[in-house]
Amino acid sequence: MSLIFTFVLTITLISLSPARKNQRAHYESAVPVILDTDMESDVDDAGALAMLHALADMDKTRILGVIVCALNPWSVLCVDRINTYFGREDIPLGQIRGPGVDRESRYARQVAEEFPGSLMKNEDAPDAVGQYRRILASQPDKSVVVISIGYLTNLRELLKSQPDEISALPGRELVNKKVSLWICMGGQFPSGREANIRWDTEASTEAIAKWPTPIIFSGWETGLMDTGAKISELPDSNPVRRAYELFGRIPHKNWDQVAVLYAILGHNDGPLSDFWELSEPGWILIDSTDGSNTWKKDPGGMHRHLIQKGTDDEIAFEIDKLMMHTPD
């Protein structure tokens, strides 16, 4: 498979097979997305957010909001700095409130302190659940794609939320009405123990079990290719470059970036759909004692997971191009 992308205002595909051209004709652009991120422990969150902005500049997605699922006080400020760099400082932000996961970050504080933004302290960011409810209530039915690349605490709390002045619907009904799909970077298939699931195992178990729409899992095993080798060539003004330099592992793996790439360009017969296939329907089963997971096949199941078909080099090539995008 050979895919060449020319970056102008949109992605131009060259040398495509007739079948791929037919797929692209049916591909729906400008996917409306809410990104749920921890933006602290690993730097692939920063790379994934950069990719979303690149795809938004190409009119392939609309970023409805970025919601932070980590208690680290610098995480949401780091998100704000990246959004500001890409000219989208008005993207709605949300910050987890109450119990959750609090881990150190090698880059979030420094990025927050070194780059401009509109948010001065994390307490100024709206509550994550309220922001979810506002965004979802404002969107057409069955239109929103949720991409989670962190802990599942916010999504558990969203499902538990009660009717309020934003919406007369309780959380689970609001999700069922407005969300078309949840793409979760989490789990390891057919079995394993992955960080996003295990760090708040109780929230993961509840959110996944009670989620009313289909879930596609982008597992740990799908993100093992390396990218970012040339990230130091980005301008000094780019906070994503700085985040990678502070993190100190260049090149780096792509767990979160694969979830974003699939969500926008791979799902629903997108132009990169040949890079993956979906597993048979089933259910992810989570061990409450240690957060490990197994897979149960079930024709009636609402869960599926990605199976990589493209090569590591092909997928890394597409991720690198998007991560190296700079705003006009």
Image: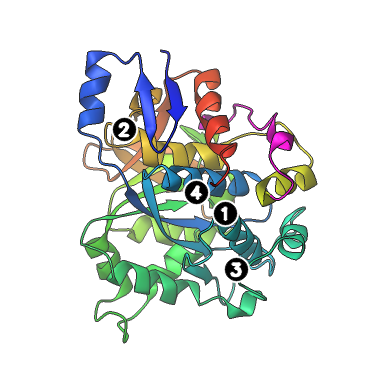
**Quadrant of res 143:** bottom left
Q: Which residue is mark 3?
A: 100
Q: Is 241 colored magenta in this rendering? A: no
Q: In the depicted view, which residue is nearer to us: 246 or 170?
A: 246
Q: Name the mark on residue 197.
A: none
At horizontal 55% and vertical 71% (from top left) the residue drawn is 96
Q: Disc 4 designates what residue?
A: 53
Q: Are marks 2 and 4 in contact (CB under 8 Å)?
A: no
Q: What amino acid is at disc 2?
A: Gly
- Residue type indicated by callout 1: Thr
Mark nearest the camera among 3 and 4 is 4
Q: How many residues crowd mark 2 within 10 Å: few (<14), some (14–19), many (20+)?
A: many
Q: Which residue is label 1 attached to?
A: 289
Look at the numbered disc 2 and give the secondary structure of its residue.
Answer: loop
Decide: is 184 above or below 23: below
Q: Residues under labels 1 and 3: Cα distance?
A: 18 Å
Report if residue 219 is visible in the image. no
Nearest to the eye among marks 2 and 1: give it. 2
Which secondary structure dominates the residues rendered in magenta?
loop
> Where residue 1 sits: x, y (%)?
41, 12
In the rendered structure, which segment of residues is drawn in magenta?
A: 221-237
Residue drawn 42% across and 77% down? 130
* Mark before the other along the chain sequence, 2 or 4: 4
How far across and down, in percent of the image, does residue 2 sit?
A: 43, 13
Q: Earlier in the sequence, mark 3 or mark 2?
A: 3
Judge the density around disc 3: few (<14), some (14-19), many (≥20) Cα neighbours within 10 Å: some
* Disc 2/disc 4 C-alpha distance (Å): 18 Å
Residue identifier under label 2: 270
Whether residues under marks 1 and 4 lie with C-beta atoms below 8 angstroms apart, the answer is no
* Disc 4 element: helix
Check disc 3 and give the amino acid type.
Gly
